Structure formats: structure tokens, C-alpha cells
Image (cartoon, rainbow, N blue to C red):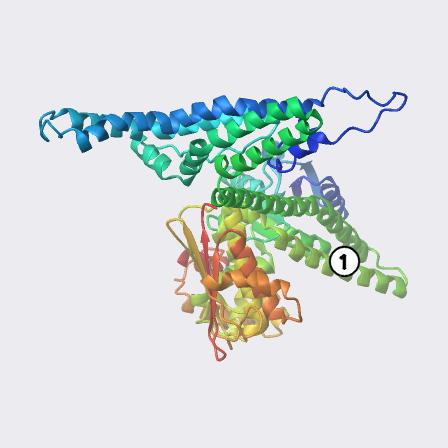
Amino acid sequence: MRVVIAEDSVLLREGLVQLLNAFEIAVVAAVADADSLLLATAEHQPDLVIVDVRMPPTYTDEGIRAALAVRQRWPRTGIVVLSQYVEERYAVDLLSTWSSGVGYLLKDRVADVADFVAALRRVAVGGTALDPEVVAQLLQRRANPIDRLTGRELDVIQLMAEGRSNTAIATALRISPSAVEKHVNSIFTKLDLPPADTDHRRVLAVLSYLHAH
Amino acid sequence: MVEAIAGRDYRGLVSSVDQTEPPRPGLPPGPVDTPPPAPAIRASLHVLAGLPLSITGWTMVVGVPVAVWYWPVWRLMYGHVGYGPLSDWPITPVLLVLAAGLTLLVLPARIRAATRWQRLRFRYLLAVELPPPPPTRAGRPIDRLVREWTAPGTWRQFLYHAVAPLPAAMAAVAVPVCWLLAPPFAPRAAGALADADAARAGALLGPSLAEEMARQLAELAHSRAEVIAATDAERRRIERDLHDGAQQRLVSLAMKLGLARTTLTDIPEPARRTLDEAHDELKAALAELRGFVRGLHPPILDDRGLDAALSAVTANCPVPVRLRVRVADRCAPAVEAVAYFVVCEALTNVAKHARASRAEVDVERTGDRLRIVVSDDGCGGARLDGHVRLDGDARHDIGDRLDGAGPVGAAGTGLRGLARRASAVDGTLSIVSPTSGPTRITVELPCGW
């Protein structure tokens, strides 16, 4: 797996490189701003870019805009956005157009290195990695449709939105995979999600909340 | 001495002219016929110059108008005697209209001109700065004229010029007489007379008490706005510094500890436990710091506005919150910040005290008013301090109660802080919270503050 990192804090940038190297992930470029990120991506065609939201020059949402630009030009490149705070609005920007190969995580999550690296690998192969806080915010925002879900279904969709597989959800909730399957189907029904043969129905379940807004 | 002092504190200044300077070392005491100190000369000159100036001023504001009115009024009252009332028609009405027009158009300007000259006399001879009355606001000529005629300052100035020749004449006689007959007392006399003149001019030629209060109020409002803007800027700066500094450093450290925890598998058990604990504590510290830094000033508020910033706040509230934001145009940054923190504080209150099952946040901009309503279905009884229900008009009491000290409940503290934030930008706050609930907090803020 080949990765480009865009992070303006030298300390954290070097730390990330060190971390990924320790897990035998090749960091092909580590840059400090959005423009360099686009150049590096064009040059190296990485599998994944890791990008900080707040970067020069305005320190607001450069990272989000850079991520959208990368996705537009290189749709197969996975994108993980790191942020000091999670903002529902940025998540909507990021997820409303594409629902696969995207991650949005709190910077704090890099402390749990194994989970973090697993999330990176997931996104690189087209999966999703949403911070639990992002998911909580998105679900809260969609308060009305969620009223129709049971407590257990809420647990399931929360884990689903984080990008977990049925098996992982079953393990986390200590229920059988078939029970998870049942809950998932129930969620689809309650959210009026028509059956479709895409690979990302699970993410669409979460995104349907957004589009219903 | 006197020259060195400027500003409004002219009272008593002039009388200080007779204070002799301490004798310089090495010099014999001055001879009896020492020339009087310069300030006494200036005070005398001021008094002497007062006579021609005040006579000129009186002529401009009293003499000329009387002369202009004299002829037509005389004709109106006595013109018909011997000739019949209409014998000289239309001369009397024409003269009357001319006199009225001249007075109406010219008198306020003449009054101000006379005041200007007097002000120059005070400035250059007495080094006393008479504060000018507030300038007439711009507008159509007719509006300016009406404002000039109705301004109380105009008529106080008129009063000064109308009576000025009398004291000026007496002083202009008294001072030379003093210099001739009793030179040692002359500086004291000139000082006292100049002092009296300055007091009279200060009361009648400067701004009135109400005008002065209005000016100070405007100044206060301006400086308060600056203080609030500076506070906001400071919070942004601290947020940015912590974000760029401590937070990055701690995240990096947590990452390294995490890496150590994952890769160092063959270390002794106590070391491993210490490592695990350090890592967990660091993560907790990071989460705490994140909450604190975000509470300082959320960057997304500047970037995307109230709706985006409040989304995260309502989402993180343990009580389910329905958020509705209808703000087409962004408000001033200071107002957005107040609105944001008001909602944070109110929701914290809901979560801590209301025992509510749900809450609603409604933010709406109508014209240049921003209205924020935070309501919940909880137990009610919310109060600012004591069991007081406060409405918008009573908000001035808040400050008094704040200073009243005494133990206050946590609920009161939060809500009072909220009320203070609102009133800092000329907003109002009202709480309706009967003891059985529900609670409804309404805050109205001016958008363009």
C-alpha cells in the first residue's frame, strides 16, 4: 500500500511516517499543504491519501477541499481526513457525493495505532472509516427517521456507519451473524431503502439519513 | 504653568497664576519691582480682550437682530397713526418677512461664529480648551436649520453673548485699575476675573450635561465593542495556539506511546502496565483538551456559520435535540459567537438540571434581529439567581445581583453568564420556567452589532 500524507504540523507528519513505516506501509510523500498534496498525488498515484483538515493558508477546511479535488481526479484513491474536531458539516461535504473509499477520523484516533492502521487499510480498498463521533452527529441530525429504529438496530447502524462488517458487528455486540443480518434488513426496510446490487448498501443506509435532510 | 494644562479642568487653574515659583539656588531674592509672572499678564490680556470681543458678539447676536426688527415692528405698531393702517401697505409686511427671514437663517450661524471667537480667546490667552458642542448632524438644509434652532446649546451660547458685555466691561475696568493702584494684588484679581469668565464660558459655551453624557455614552459603547472584539480575537488566538502547539505535540506523543504499546510485546509486566496506563491517561487528557479548546472558539463557526457549528453541539448533547437554523445572511462575528455560546450554555443546563427527555433549539434571523429559543420538556424551575423570573426589561438587574455575591446554585451561574453574554451585545434574555416545567429561554440579539 502506498500513501501520501498532507499534514502541516511537522511533529505529527514525521510521527505518521514513522508509524506507517512500522506497519510496513510505504509513505511515498509527506507534504505540508493542499497544493503539494495534489502535486504529490499526481506524481505518485498512491492508494491512499491522509489529509489534515486545517492547513495553510486559511486554516479552515483546506483539507476537505483538497480531499474532494483528489477524489474528483483520482476516484480510485482512498481518502482519510484527519481532524482535531469532527464536524458534521465537513462529513456531509465529504460523504454526500461518494460513499466508498472515504474515512473521517479524529486525530486522537492515531493513538490507537492498530485500529488506526486497520481503518487506513479498509479505506484503501474502498471501505469506509468514520469516527464514532461523526456517526453520532450524523445520526443525531437525522433524529426523525431514527425514531423508527429499535435500540439494537441503532447499535447495528452505528457500527455499520463506522465501516464494520457483519462479522465485526456480531462480535462487537455479542450476537450471531444471522441476527445482525436480520437487523440490517430491518433497517433497510424501515429507511425505505430499495434493494440494489451495489457494494455499498450498508453505507447508503447511513447516507440516506443525510439525503433525507 | 497654566499653559501646560489643557482639557476641561480649567476651574481654579487661573487662580494658580499667583503662586510664586520656589527661589532658585544661587540667586538672591528678587527685587521688590520684579515683573509680574507671565500668566498674570495673559490673564489680564484675556480680560481686556474680553471687552471688544463680547461687544462684537453682543452686536452680532442681539444688536443686529434688534435693529432689523425695530423698523417693521415700529411701523406695525405705530405706522397707521395719522396715515391709516393700510396707507403704507405692503412695506410693513415686506419688512417683517425680511426681518424674520434674516433672523431665521442667520442668527444660529452668528451665535456659533461669536462662540468660535470666544473659544479662540480662551485657547490662546488662557490656554483653556472649551469643548465644542456636538456638531449639527448632516441632512437637508431645512433639517439642519431646525436642529440648530432647537438645540439647547444654541440658546445657552446666546445667553452668554447677550450678557457678556456687562461683566466684561466691569472686568476690563477693574484689572487696569488694579495694576495702577495696587500692583501686588493685580495678578490675583486678573486671575479671579479670568477664572470667573472661564467658569461662565464652560457652563454656557460648551456641551450641556445631557450632551456630555450622550458623548460619554457613545464613547463607552464604542470601547465596550472594542473590548468584546478583543476578547473574541484573544479566544481565537488561544484556540489556534493550542491547536498548533500542545494538541499536535500530545497527539504525536500518544501515537508514539501507542506504537510502543503495540510493538513492545516482550517487556516486563510492570513496565507494560505503566505503559498502558500512561497511554490511556494521555488519551483521556487529549479528549479533555479537545473539549476545552473547542469551547474556546470553534473554528467552524467562522468558516461555516451558526448552523454548522451548532450541529456538532446539539449532536453531542446527551438529551436529543432538534435543531432548526433559519439564518439567510451571516450575522456579525461577535453576535454569532454570543449566539453559539448561549446555545452551548443553555444545552449544558438542560443536560445537567432539566431532567428533560428532549430539547429544541430554534435560531431565526428576522431583519436585523437574531432570535434564539432553547426549550425543553424538563422539570422547569430554571432561574438566574434565587427564584426570580427575569424578562427582557429586567435584565439590568442582572449586574446588581452578580455583584451581590452570596452562594449561588450551578444553574444560576450558567444562566447568569448567559444573560451577561447577551446583554454584552445589547441583546435581551428571557426565561420562562415554571416549577413543573417546561423551560423556554429566549434570547434576542441585534445582528449587525
Instruction: Tell me the residue that label 1 is attached to.
Output: B282
Q: Quadrant of the N terminus of chain B?
A: top right
* Residue drawn at the location 72% of the way across and 47% of the way down: B248
Where residue B363 sits, quadrant-wise, is bottom left
Question: How far across and how far down the image is residue A94, in percent?
Answer: 51, 48
Q: Is B351 in front, or is B27?
A: B27
Question: How far across and how far down the image is residue B441, in percent?
Answer: 48, 65
Q: Using the image, determine if residue B104 lies above or below residue A187.
A: above
Asked if residue A162 can be seen in this view, the reply is no
Q: Using the image, determine if residue A124 lies above or below residue A45.
A: below
Q: Point out the residue furthest to the bottom here.
A: B436
Find numbered disc 1 in the image and state the secondary structure of the residue it sits on.
helix
Q: Is B374 in front, or is B142?
A: B142
Question: How far across and how far down the image is residue B197, in percent?
Answer: 55, 33
Q: Point out the residue furthest to the front here.
A: B181
Asked if residue B217 can be seen in this view, the reply is yes
Q: Residues within 10 Å of mark 1 (few under 14, many from 20)?
A: many
Q: Is B269 in front, or is B119?
A: B119
Q: How many marks?
A: 1
Q: Is residue A3 left or right of residue B110?
A: right
Question: How far across and how far down the image is residue B77, in percent?
Answer: 19, 33
* Residue drawn at the location 53% of the way across and 39% of the way down: A74
Where residue B193 sits, quadrant-wise, is top right
Q: Using the image, determine if residue B209 lies above or below residue B93.
A: below
Q: Is residue B311 left or right of residue A106?
A: left
Where residue B290 sits, quadrant-wise, is bottom right
* Residue drawn at the location 55% of the way across and 48% of the way down: B300
Q: Is B114 in front, or is B67?
A: B67
Chain under callout 1? B
Q: What amino acid is at disc 1? A: Leu
